[in-house]
Amino acid sequence: MNEANNLFAALIELADDHLVLGHRLSEWCGHAPTLEEDLALPNLALDLLGTARQLYASAGEIEGLGRDEDQLAYHRDEREFRNCLLVEQPNGDFAFTVLRQFYFSAFMKEYWRQATASANALIRGIAGRAANEASYHTRYASEWTIRLGDGTDESRARMHAAIEDLHRYTGELFASSEAARSCEKANLLPWRATMRDEWTKTSKRVFSEARLSYPECEFFLAGGRQGKHGECLGHMLAEMQYLQRSYPGANW
Amino acid sequence: MLRLRRVEILTESTPLWEVFIRPRNGLAHKHVGSLHAADAEMALIGARNAYTRRGEGNSIWVVASIDISSSDPDKSSEDFDSALTKAYRHPTFYNVPDGVENL
């Protein structure tokens, strides 16, 4: 694979992460536990969707086959999606959604910060705003994690259940696909593996403030970067892509 | 002074907060609405999503609604009516020099 192919593949991984998590958050719209969260979660979703659009548009440009952001988002099948497994996990309860957001945002905050020094101007252009947004998302999710963890017996039990379920998906954040590694070597994208220290430090600090014990997890699940997803992603894409598949090119 | 009744504005775990936004530097924070939140930090986080999504400002204040004291609506005549007859307190007898915008 040449450099353009690698960069295209690596940008699709990032774009899919943002689109899939953004869509998951948008599923809360009209269903969140309070009016405040009903505004907050879709607001976070729109931040992620905005980043996904820029990433798809850049990827399409680099690919040079005329595919635009809509074609990349709506006309690829489940096995062609390259998002990590963490972001596709169904919403569960509010604690589950908050923890999933915390794990992802705490990683992306550092990732985008470092990406502002990329050798590629397109990536630098996306990274500045995305870093700001990821930083806010981390604050939102950290504060909720602390209040739920150190809240009532009920909220605490739910945070524990969420950790039990989600922590095993976090290992995949630090693993780079072949395409991503080649971009990392070319200083186009930050090294995923180097985020681990900062991410672990942030997680341990927040967990300790939330009086939650940090899990000793030895087995991590992966496969999303090879297109091997859980059953849940197919269901999500069926709903997300329905309109464009039924009426290709539809707009308003 | 009338203290707002606790039962009206306190829910079990998320009391009400009043939100003030400063549209830009140099202007005062202005009341824009309220929201429920567990504490001040969460109220600030919530206000960002509820009240600044369209670029409304660059600074947020939140104040617990319970800490706001209000004048008594039943005493509004004795509080305010006497000002109505004192037109000379309005600076309408001066000519505003050209170029002064924020008077």
Image (cartoon, rainbow, N blue to C red):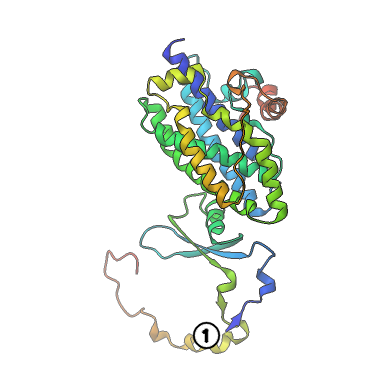
State the quadrant of the C terminus of chain A: top right
| Observer-nearest of A101 and B49 | A101
* Residue A237: percent from left, percent from top: 68, 27
Residue appearing at x 60%, y 34% in the figure: A21
Can residue A252 be seen by looking at this rendering?
no
Residue A45 falls left or right of residue A129? right
Q: Inspect the image, locate mark 1, and give the three-letter code of the amino acid beneath it.
A: Phe
Please provide percent x and percent y for residue A231.
72, 25
Which image quadrant is residue A236 in? top right
Asked if residue B90 can be seen in this view, the reply is yes
Q: Please indicate whether residue A195 sits to the left or right of residue A73 in the image.
A: left
x, y percent for residue A39:
61, 49
Q: Provide the secondary structure element on which disc 1 rests.
A: helix
* Above/below status of A250 relative to B17: above
Q: Residue at x 42, y 22 (%)?
A: A184
Q: Residue at x 33, y 80 (%)?
A: B93
- State the residue position of label 1: B80
Image check: A196 left or right of A147?
left
Q: Give the quadrant of residue A230.
A: top right
Q: Is residue B37 above or below residue A117?
A: below
The percent coordinates of residue A102 (x first, y second) are: 57, 42
- Determine which quarter of the picture holds residue A89: top right
Number of dots carrying numbers: 1
Q: Chain of mark 1?
A: B
Residue depicted at 57% across the width and 47% down the height: A207
Please rate how many residues cluster around mark 1, counting C-alpha atoms within 10 Å: few if below 14, some from 14 to 19, many from 20. Answer: few
